[in-house]
Amino acid sequence: MEQYYVTTPIYYVNSTPHIGHAYTTVAADVFARHQRQRGRETFLLTGVDEHASKVARVAEEQGLAPQAYADRIVEAWRALPARLGVSNDFFIRTSDDGHKRFVQEFLTRIRDNGREDIYQDVYAGLYCVGCEAFKTEDELVDGKCPQHDVEPEWIEERNWFFRLSAYQERLLALYDERPDFVLPGFRANEARSFIAGGLQDFSISRAGQPWGIPIPWDPDQVAYVWADALVNYLSALTYARPGEDLIPRFWPVAHHLLAKDILRFHCVYWPALLLAAGYDVPRQLFVHGYLLLNDRKISKSLGNVVDPLDLIDVYGADAVRFWCARSVSFGQDGVASIDGLRERYERELGNDLGNLLSRVTAMVARYRQGTLAAVPSGDSEVAAIVAPLGDDVAARLDVFDLTGALERIWEVVRGLNRHVEVTAPWQVAKDEARSAELDRVLYDLVDGLRAVAVALAAYLPDTSGRILAALGQAQTLDWAEVAYGRARAAENVEPAAPLFPRVDEPTLAA
Ligand code: MSP
């Protein structure tokens, strides 16, 4: 069996989950669910990054040990995938013993690789705690980190360094040999030019900090948070299933999703660290843009946080998932708004999809007393619309075209709505002589909607199941079911309750 491994970044446990985090998490879930439908053994990983220096600072302010503080705030992060209906196979915490042990082994492997890739030196420089990264003067705007609007701190200490500079040639060769290593292409170019511009060694340890993973050969230092966090993609596989090492199965078939803010760490540092430790580089990285709300990056420091859980309370997880996938072309930056969510909820989910189901089930109930005859015709208009759907959607999702694949499914939803109007079953039902035709029309509509429900299962898992149930169809989600003529005969089909009932406008900050 073929394997597929997909990851989100692990989110800083001390930040507040917002719609931007939900965005990557939903996207990863769509890819994972889709690959499972294609019969691939799939592993979806998400989780939290706990060893940021800010965690220790805030814990101290609150009079708590860092671990106790992290244990408390992690719950908001566990709730995010759970409430979004995300099918993650594991939730990693970088404070897990299994992760800590693996990071120590990983760093030791680099140190022992015979090339002196880890060495000691003194580091002095400006450090932004928000980014957990050193900054050069020219990266600052008015002396401040433009992302966090704070002045970086001057740090000077003896650290362990990773010889990133030694990996320039190998990384360039990697990008040249594998044009789809990083997608979209313009992000690959960005990473490649950064590498071509010359790589500087970076410090992988911090002195004088109690919170972090001790450097095994120098326990007075802890691993730099990024040297710790990136390794999660590998470490999780070693202990997610007790007693089982999943690395041979799921590495290197990894697909990392991330936004452009952490491109360098993932597209440059991570492959170099892996090569140094003697591991293969991941199969692919997809770098998406920022989801902006009212033209601004969504972040707590800028004060326009929208809690995704609030949106789920009002609209439901599937509607939030739909909005994430549909509002902005995945890969690009784009603006989403709460008004847009409401609008899509009513027009696309409520009308295009929900009303279609209501109409089709009501007609089967009314004209056929709830009994659907299995009479596929083979060459109907619905057969023609549905035939290319499976391949088209799969091809798009294979290249992470989250938005394009959903639009392709929506074309079929619109096509089925048109088909209802064109065939006008209410007219056909008036004429006893057209009884066989009515059976065929109803079958086609049910079957088309069934195929759509299977295709949508990765995006709208709950809705998909409800559609299949309302149509009296099996909950079979194999990708082969995204084809014409798979609907089975059904009894007792009743007019379906609205899939997306009207909601009262809540008081949400927009
Ligand atoms: N802890 C690091 C990642 C370590 S991965 C080994 C980190 N965490 S974070 O909490 O800041 O999350 C960053 C990620 O959150 C982004 O790469 C992206 O996936 C997601 N997003 C955060 N804000 C976002 C938007 N406004 N829009 C889209 N995605 C956003 O960096």
Image (spheres, helix red, strand yellow):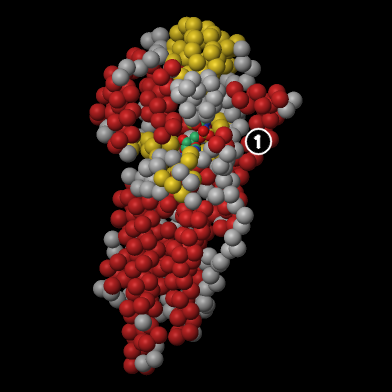
Q: Where 265 falls versus 253 (above or below)?
A: above
Image label count: 1
Callout 1: helix, strand or loop? Answer: helix
Q: Where 501 falls versus 342 (above or below)?
A: below
Residue 422 spot, x, y in % from top left = 32, 78
Q: Nearer the viewer, residue 293 or 91?
A: 293
Residue 315 spot, x, y in % from top left = 56, 58
Furthest-front residue in this view: 142
Q: Nearer the viewer, residue 299 or 310?
A: 299
The residue that appears at 52% across and 28% down in the rendered structure is: 149
Q: Amino acid at mark 1?
A: Ile
Q: Nearer the viewer, residue 148 or 132?
A: 148
Furthest-right residue in this view: 63
State the residue position of label 1.
73
Q: Where 252 falls versus 488 (above or below)?
A: above
Residue 389 spot, x, y in % from top left = 32, 60
Residue 358 visible somewhere in the drawing: yes
Q: Mark 1, residues whose alpha carbon is within 10 Å: few (<14), some, or many (≥20)?
A: some
Q: Nearer the viewer, residue 146 or 495?
A: 146
In-image side of 133 versus 58 (left or right): left
